[in-house]
Image (cartoon, rainbow, N blue to C red):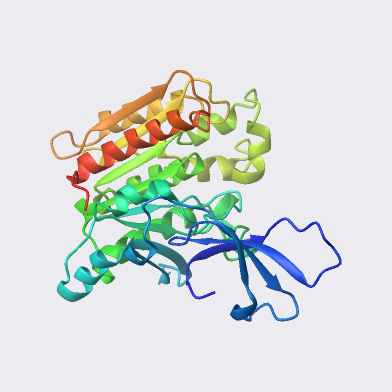
Amino acid sequence: FDESAYDVGVGVNYDYSTEKLTLYYNSLTTPLQSLQVTMNDPNNKDKRVVLKKKNVPGYEKSTYGCQRINVTVRDGTEVPVSMVYRNDDMEEHIANGTTMPVHLVGYGSYGLCSEADFSATRLPLLNRGIIYAIAHVRGGGEMGRQWYEEPNGAKYLCKKNTFNDFCDVAKWLIEDKKLTTPPQLSCEGRSAGGLLIGASINQAPELFGVAILGVPFVDVVCTMTDSSIPLTCAEWEEWGNPNEEKFFEYMKSYSPINNVKQGVKYPSCLLTGGLHDPRVQYWEPAKFAAELRHGHDKDSSGPVCLKIDMTAGHFSASDRYKYLSELAFDYAFLLDQLGLNEKK
């Protein structure tokens, strides 16, 4: 495939006796499409047939560009980063060295991949000059099972690799790539990705201007020690069993709620939760918001906003229009704190 950042997989194939295979393909700039390839010559682009592609009204692919780069982090590991942007913004940066607002997202848990796929809801950010970057940090599965498992992945007693990778990518964007500045750099993660953001802003609050933590798993020690919570015992397979001292002490050393720095400037933060969330109970973002408000430097830090949806669970609203409304709320906070409100 010509694009350096994309998501591809095997589609639905009902006919077993055939030389043709249906794939799904999309990228940060290419909407989802079904491709038919010849298995005898799968790399021959002339023989590929686009069976169906998703229509995105008003979208012009030529306006946008994407790339995937590797960032060398503190222990020498190369961490992939996928970026999507408007071409005119990147051209301005290359020509004049102009810094750009960058929105850095990540997950890095359970061996799950953060795919470099297409999202129409990302366009409002791109059209306001934001460069959207996905850090494929350790703890996910982007680079194989070793990206997740001990000793060099990010599970159990090497979980901090996830947070170190994310902070090092942020530092690279600022200091090496010189693409952005701390006031222009925002970050976002949901669920275990919220843990990533909470731990990262504790480790290096000076790197970020805005942070969005969606249903964040930020009270790791308390949750993992309460075996009456239905999911806790199963989660010991991911984080370790805190009944063992080594895991307890290690969890406590990175759990966001236990490591808020006192009297330090923190980024503007939006924390969201759902009253009926069975995975990350609503009191986790509520407690972390209270810790941030109590600990951060009140004169220099941004606002800490907490929003609890009284009807939602872990995956936000099931209604499509309410989901878009919730997403618009997050974007409104982000754009307001970055000082961006004009669409190109």
Q: Is residue 265 visible?
A: no
User: 12 and 104: which one is in front?
Assistant: 12
Residue in view at x 19 percent, y 46 percent:
340
**Residue 189 percent across, percent down from the top left:** 43, 44
Against 93, is 193 above or below? above
Q: Left of 119 or right of it: where is 58?
A: left
- Quarter-wise, where is residue 88 in the image? bottom left
Q: Left of 78 or right of it: where is 234?
A: right
**Residue 193 percent across, percent down from the top left:** 47, 45
Against 154, is 259 above or below? above
Residue in view at x 62 percent, y 25 percent:
229
- Quarter-wise, where is residue 129 in the image? bottom left
Tally the numbered discs. 0
**Residue 230 percent across, percent down from the top left:** 66, 26
Residue in view at x 49 percent, y 39 percent:
191
User: 172 and 112: which one is in front?
Assistant: 112
Q: Left of 183 or right of it: where is 203?
A: right
**Residue 13 percent across, percent down from the top left:** 76, 58
In the image, farthest residue toward the top: 310
User: 303 and 153: which one is in front?
Assistant: 303
Which quarter of the rendering shows the N terminus? Answer: bottom right
Q: Is residue 216 visible?
A: yes
